[in-house]
Image (tube, rainbow, N blue to C red):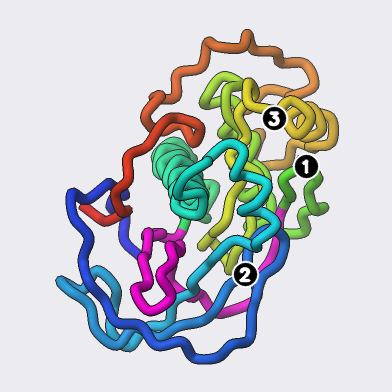
């Protein structure tokens, strides 16, 4: 992990990966497989390191074909990468804004777009993280009851994203190992996200980290739609070109 921002490279880089087993992980809309990187150009992936390759279930692809009529899987992968990239940028801003009394620094894994020649298919790939995998809230706005400062920080981060973007975006589905997160849902108020945002505003209980960040009570604070300040090119619903994600 580093603190660099993700970007879109002009050309792809090559890497060799070895599928370690056919056992699938994950759930929901995707399947996930563990792979080993054996070689890569310019160390875009780290040889000897484990990664998770993610693909979409056939029924998910079929559902989205009405929207993405061509290259459906590619567009779904790009959409996922764009969401994680938007959430990643928000963590950078959050970590600059948080006071020293909040010692945890949430951050999202770097995610790459992968075309596997042997499978003839597009995937998303990210580093494999080890440790106790935990879920702090879900994409409907339901959250755990926090029992420690790490959990409070993660829930406060979701609240902060809503305030920082003036009600335009809300990062939910926070999950990962320790401070390292993956697979977020970036909810946009004007993109069928009203139910999740409404549910989060009703169910979120401000904790000590919310107070340290001086966040207002969600139940009393309203924003006018369309007045957010988050850059359009970073929004997960903005258009994107067919390139791969890379580090600067």
* Residue 177 percent location from the top left of the image: 58, 68
Residue in the picture at 41% in, 31% down: 239
With respect to residue 67, does 44 lie above or below? below
Going by the image, does 122 lie left or right of 131?
A: left
Dividing the picture into quarters, in which one does residue 181 lie? bottom right
Whether label 3 touches label 1, CB < 8 Å = no
Dividing the picture into quarters, in which one does residue 82 lie? top left
Residue 140 — which label? 1
Residue in the picture at 32% in, 53% down: 245
- Residue under pointer 3: 193
Asked whether residue 188 is in view, the answer is yes
Residue 18 — which label? none
Cα separation, mark 1 vs mark 2, equals 21 Å
The part of the chain drawn in magenta is: 109-136
Which one is in front, 143 or 66? 66
With respect to residue 234, does 42 lie above or below? below
Q: Residues within 10 Å of mark 2 (few under 14, many from 20)?
A: some
Nearer the viewer's eye, disc 1 or disc 2?
Answer: 2
Label 1: which secondary element: loop
Residue 93 included in the magenta stretch of the image: no
Q: Quadrant of the N terminus?
A: bottom left
Cα separation, mark 2 vs mark 3, equals 24 Å
- Residue under pointer 2: 31
Q: Residues within 10 Å of mark 1 (few under 14, many from 20)?
A: some
Q: Residue furthest left?
A: 42
Label 2: which secondary element: strand
Q: Tell me which label, 2 or 3, sits earlier in the chain.
A: 2
* Residue 80 percent location from the top left of the image: 51, 50
Residue in the picture at 37% in, 37% down: 240
């Amino acid at each position: 992990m580093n603190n660099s921002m993700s970007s879109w490279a002009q050309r792809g880089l090559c890497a060799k990966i070895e599928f370690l087993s056919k056992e699938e992980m994950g759930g929901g809309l995707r399947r996930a497989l563990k792979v080993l990187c054996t070689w890569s150009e310019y160390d875009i992936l780290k040889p000897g390191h484990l990664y998770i390759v993610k693909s979409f279930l056939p029924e998910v692809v079929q559902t989205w074909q009405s929207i993405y009529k061509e290259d459906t899987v590619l567009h779904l992968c790009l959409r996922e990468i764009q969401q994680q990239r938007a959430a990643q940028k928000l963590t950078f801003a959050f970590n600059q804004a948080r006071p020293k009394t909040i010692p945890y620094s949430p951050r999202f894994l770097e995610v790459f777009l992968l075309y596997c020649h042997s499978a003839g298919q597009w995937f998303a790939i990210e580093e494999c993280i080890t440790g106790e995998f935990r879920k702090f809230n879900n994409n409907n706005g339901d959250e755990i009851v926090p029992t420690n400062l790490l959990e409070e920080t993660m829930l406060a981060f979701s609240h902060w994203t809503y305030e920082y973007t003036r009600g335009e975006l809300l990062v939910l589905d926070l999950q990962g190992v320790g401070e390292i997160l993956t697979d977020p849902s970036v909810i946009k108020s004007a993109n069928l996200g009203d139910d999740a945002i409404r549910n989060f505003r009703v169910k979120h209980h401000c904790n000590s980290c919310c107070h340290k960040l001086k966040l207002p009570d969600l139940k009393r604070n309203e924003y006018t739609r369309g007045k957010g300040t988050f850059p359009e090119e970073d929004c997960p619903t903005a258009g994107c070109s067919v390139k791969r994600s890379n580090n600067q």
